[in-house]
Image (cartoon, coloured by chain):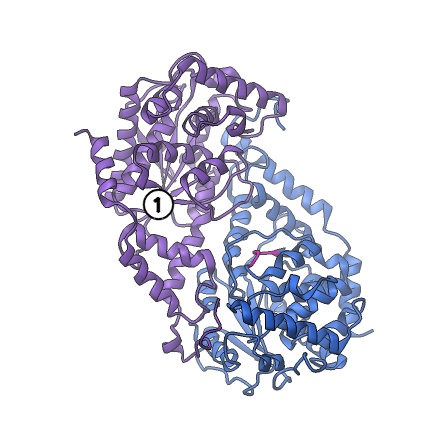
Chain colours: A purple, B blue
């Protein structure tokens, strides 16, 4: 059995969320000095964390953000507002601590792991005193232009997934109790849109958005590029790994692996925006029970994001018109998860505080 | 000129938000290593803070949550799922540090100020080692039952507003750079619904919700009580102070004063749920330019909340089905405001990080 097959098998064996842990978490929440359920989705976060981990009161510290960077041959088709060298420039900015993910990670006490999954300008050199850890991989250069052929071979897609599994396994082995995901790759909303269009069987116009800020003419061109990529590759929508190899970027493939490994390890996985959702969609296509083990941090301004979250049955915590990536939305939502844990652990109970409960029989 | 009239005058003199500070904040955000506007509402928070304070990069620490507690004669009409003694019990829980507001305030580094604006069981005694500061007022006992007559005299309403102004002025004088508001008062969604129905000229059924969790029969009864309160008092919708005196609770009146004082002092005021929104609606009715100086933390599960926020032109940051009060929603949103300030202050610029900008003419 391959590494990938073992992870899929492990997640399938876990099955649904842990009902006993969830009911213990719910009982604890209902004992606290507030009307039952009055903290709404904050309470449901605490119950979901219990279900994912099998622990009624799991900790979510320490935690890390795994930000996967790669370049995309399709960037040559003019699908981004930014030149391709920005991918490498931003990875250096992550390492130096000046990017949005750097700032938000500091605020939320999150370790940042940056994965170099193949950049057009060659491997990034680590900084001696960087604020993020750089993981270099065997992948070199951009993935191929999906508008003229497959992004990568099937074998390379599987190796990229397994690379993501290794990265996540190492982070979890080092103690991470929650993993947030993010990405950086100029042009990567184009492969994400193509994958989502095929897996959700939607017209590309329904799932292709402005990315970092294209105007209307460029958006129309981007939709044409997505159509061309699907037409030239003719991927089989029932073969998600094949779809990923044909249309994916390597960043997305690595994120599929991170997602699978976290789920198999019963570690809560906090999604970011559209690209991480596209990776989750691939992961769930190969292993459906995985979806319940994901937490959607936000719904982005990218138009296909809502459709993917709906398909995965995920309700995002935030809706702030974000469209940056880099795990920024995940890190903005993390304080809500911390708040859920603090409420669960630190509030007084009706009994301990001497507070009267509700009158009988008047609750909805 | 009375204290109240001076505050209204001061807010009117301030007029709209500070356009110069806002454009400086916007220019700073646009210089940072991210596509312009890609952090969506997080960026708009930073711009709004500049507009409120007149400072392009205001700090929001230290900050406090002012939680106003009072009892309501209308609780005798069976409009809450909880007995009236819970108000005092929860105030003691706030002081002991076991309530949701206590836990969330610790997480967000917020000082909690609890105002005893008149409880049925008499004044609360301060704890020697409490986690929140108790402010005792001259008000004693519950406000009167609005279903049979006015909650209080007009003079008492004005004194309660001025009490709130004093509390906020003291907190701001002690250094608070942001004020969050909250409340505790069994039955207080009933006066809030009555005030909102009159000021928004809506049918009570449109703005009366389940509060802490009434079943459908009790909700219908609560709507009848709101109708009775409006019928017996016949308040003039163009006289917001008169509406407040007739239908308000004292907690709401004190919150009107807190809101006015923060706005007059150019301090960002972070609203919580429906009751604080009702107080803001009264404050804006007496001083319309005030609305731009408020930040809506969340949209609650209480049905009238959306209508009030729409009337005030406020877009909430969170929508998490909260219905607790106590400033809990405000404190859950505060990390987003902190994140906006951190992004503004700590991110690298395109120039400092050596990152390429967008290609010309492709942006939406």
* B60, above or below B26, in the image: below
* B31, above or below B68, in the image: above
In depth, the one of A175 and A282 nearer the eye is A282
Residue extending furthest toward the left: A1
In depth, the one of A178 and B80 nearer the eye is B80
Within-10-Å neighbours for mark 1: few <14, some 14–19, many 20+: some
Magenta region includes residue A237: no
Residue extending furthest toward the right: B1
Magenta region includes residue B298: yes
Q: Position of residue B347 (x, y in %)?
A: 51, 40
Q: Position of residue A244 (x, y in %)?
A: 36, 24
Which residues fall within the magenta stretch?
B296-300
In depth, the one of A324 and B145 nearer the eye is B145
Residue B177 visible in the displayed image: no
For label 1, the SS is: helix
Identify residue for label 1.
Answer: A292
Q: Where is residue A128 in the image (x, y as percent from the top left)?
A: 34, 34
* A77, above or below B3, in the image: above
From the viewer's perspective, is A27 left or right of B224?
A: left
Residue extending furthest toward the front: B217
Residue A146 visible in the displayed image: yes
Residue pictured at 48% horizontal, 36% vertical: A307
Total numbered labels placed on residues in the image: 1
């Amino acid at each position: 059995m391959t590494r990938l097959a073992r992870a899929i098998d492990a997640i399938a064996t876990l099955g649904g969320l842990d009902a006993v842990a969830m009911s213990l978490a719910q009982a604890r929440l209902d004992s606290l000095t507030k009307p039952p359920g009055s903290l709404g989705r904050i309470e449901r976060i605490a119950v979901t964390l219990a279900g994912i981990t099998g622990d009624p009161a799991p900790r979510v510290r320490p935690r890390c953000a795994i930000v996967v960077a790669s370049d995309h041959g399709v960037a040559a088709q003019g699908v981004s507002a930014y030149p391709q060298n920005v991918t490498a420039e931003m990875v250096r900015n992550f390492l130096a601590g000046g990017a949005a993910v750097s700032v938000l990670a500091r605020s939320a006490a999150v370790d940042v792991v940056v994965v170099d999954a193949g950049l057009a300008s060659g491997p990034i050199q680590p900084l001696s005193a960087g604020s993020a850890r750089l993981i270099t991989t065997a992948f070199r250069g951009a993935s191929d232009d999906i508008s003229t052929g497959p992004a990568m071979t099937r074998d390379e897609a599987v190796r990229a997934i397994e690379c993501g599994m290794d990265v996540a396994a190492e982070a979890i082995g080092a103690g991470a109790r929650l993993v947030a995901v993010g990405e950086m790759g100029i042009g990567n909303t184009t492969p994400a849109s193509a994958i989502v269009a095929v897996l959700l069987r939607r017209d590309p116009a329904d799932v292709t958005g402005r990315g970092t800020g294209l105007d209307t003419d460029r958006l129309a061109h981007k939709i044409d590029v997505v159509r061309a990529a699907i037409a030239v590759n003719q991927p089989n929508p029932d073969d998600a790994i094949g779809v990923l190899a044909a249309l994916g970027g390597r960043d997305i493939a690595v994120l599929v692996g991170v997602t699978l490994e976290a789920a198999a390890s019963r570690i809560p996985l906090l999604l970011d925006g559209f690209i991480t959702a596209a990776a989750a969609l691939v992961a769930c296509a190969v292993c459906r029970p995985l979806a319940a083990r994901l937490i959607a941090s936000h719904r982005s301004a990218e138009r296909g994001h809502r459709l993917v979250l709906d398909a995965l049955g995920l309700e995002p915590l935030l809706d702030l018109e974000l469209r940056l990536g880099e795990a920024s939305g995940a890190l903005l939502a993390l304080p809500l998860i911390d708040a859920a844990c603090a409420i669960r652990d630190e509030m007084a109970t009706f009994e301990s505080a001497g507070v009267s409960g509700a009158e009988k029989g008047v609750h909805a």
